[in-house]
Image (tube, helix red, strand yellow):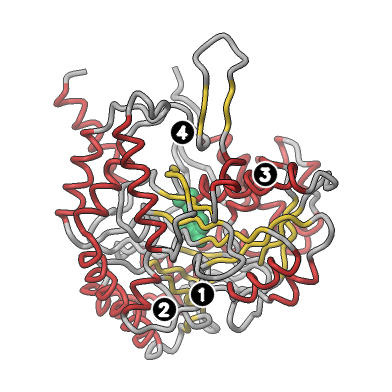
Amino acid sequence: MGEEELFERLQAFRADDLDTKGGRTWAYVYDPGRADVDRVAKRALLEFYDENALDPTVFPSLLRMENEVVGIARDHLGGDDKVVGNFTTGGTESIMMAVKTARDHAREHRPDIAHPTMVLPVTAHAAFHKAAHYFDVEAVTVPVDTTTWKADVDAIAAACDERTILLVGSAVSYAHGVIDPIPELGRLAIERDLLLHVDGCIGGFVLPYFARLGREVTPFDFTVPGVTSISMDFHKYAYCPKGSSVVLYRDAALRRHQLFAKAAWTGYTVINTTFQSTKSGGALAATWAALNYLGDEGYMDIARRTLAAVDAIIAGIAGIDDLSVMGAPESTLIALTSDTVNVFDVVDEMRADRWYVQPQLGFAGSRENIHLSVGGASLPLVPALLADLSVACERARVHPTAPPDASLVELLESIDPATLGPAELDLLLAGAGIGAGEAGTPGLPERTAGINAILNVCPPELAERVLIEYFNRIYVPPAR
Ligand SMILES: Cc1ncc(COP(=O)(O)O)c(C=O)c1O
């Protein structure tokens, strides 16, 4: 294929993708609202695209950049000279590394524990469950306060036992954008001699700026006694290209458990800090570039605009009768719920108006809601967002998607996901309207409220089984 034609094809592939810039997409992407930041980061990404972080002794530039980037994160999160860390590809990898580190730390220091557990609030990110699944550390989940949506420290203490090795808190949680009581969790961790990971993937970078702008921010970083590791994503509120996060540890003695080396095979000796072995230096160089280009002042300026947008949205929602804000958001994330309209219809109506707002299903007392990730490009769009949300609610009232009736709910609850065969899965997928399109495409209808309404009442284990099957069917190479 010729170069021109090839790029035309690539552009055409994008036809159904969400906008990544411009502020109309309120999840998945983070727009600083400044094209120069993207330009600089992408230039650095391409510059170091070919270097291989597999071996820092032969690409010392990457070692240098990683140490500098980790140093910036350490200083940002109140770490002292003992704090160390590594660059990873994202929040999930950072969290998984922290859980693996805790497991291997326990294997050395608590060899009596055959089957370790970690205790997390139900609001902790799914990545902890992924880590549990991969590393055989059982996740014990604990309900949160259903007014503040923050971790209940007494409930966490009650869930700890002789198998517990790790506690988890978020700063902030994705669903409700609130900070767990990290100082109390730190005290509990010290009292019980446990590790404590703070998931600052989404809030870690921006919260120190909000504190400097005068907001009350619950301490969550290394200044809090008992915190032993923190994850923080640069590819979210530091506006770096995707594939950019950091996991930090209180000291190198703990971080040692993260590292892997293998000399007993016939090839080159492998020493890895994180999951990947071969990895491009591109995302790291782009991160180094964005951090140094924007600098403290640049990020402060973006944080100021972002905070103004958060405040304007919360104030504006108070004027929309159909919607209300869940809890008291402390960062950049807002969850909107409704007593009068089906929020999934509102999501569809917004989509029809070229906005993307994210549906969140109900779970553990947190009812279904609409998620907004507010960022550097949001402020000028807030009046239009609020006006269109209001209209979307009116339209949602006129054409409501009925919630699934009691008999369907009963049927879904009676199904044992473990026993489902291909024929039953076909029926369930078809019944929910999922995957009806051409092979290899998402195959979702334009309006997804019906699907979301069913998933919302579906037992999570059944939803997981059906959704795995769905992905197993859409990730297929084109027919010959
Ligand atoms: C609080 C929190 N932790 C972890 C993650 C996972 O990050 P990633 O998608 O980069 O793997 C997210 C993603 O939104 C998050 O909000």
Q: Distance between the residues labelled 3 and 1?
A: 39 Å
Q: Quadrant of residue 159?
A: bottom right
**Which mark sits nearer the N-terminus, 3 or 1?**
1
Residue beneath label 2, please? 393
Residue beneath label 4, please? 440
Q: Is mark 4 within 8 Å of ligand 1?
A: no
**Which mark sits nearer the N-terminus, 3 or 2?**
2
Q: Residue 75's spot in the image, x, y percent?
A: 38, 61
Q: Is residue 475 left or right of residue 287?
A: right
Q: What element carries label 3?
A: helix
Q: Quadrant of residue 114?
A: top right
**Which mark sits nearer the N-terminus, 1 or 4?**
1
Question: Could you tell me the amino acid type at mark 1?
Answer: Val
Question: Could you tell me the amino acid type at mark 3?
Answer: Leu
Q: Which of 14/288 is in front? A: 288
Q: Is mark 1 within 8 Å of ligand 1?
A: no
Q: Does the residue labelled 2 lie within 8 Å of ligand 1?
A: no
Question: Could you tell me the amino acid type at mark 2?
Answer: Cys
Q: What element carries label 1?
A: loop
Residue beneath label 3, please? 427
Packing grade of label 1 (10 A; few <14, some 14-19, many >=20) is: many
Q: Is mark 2 on a helix, strand or loop?
A: helix
Residue beneath label 1, please? 178
Res. 378 in view: yes
**Which mark sits nearer the N-terminus, 4 or 3?**
3
Q: Which of 458/218 is in front? A: 218
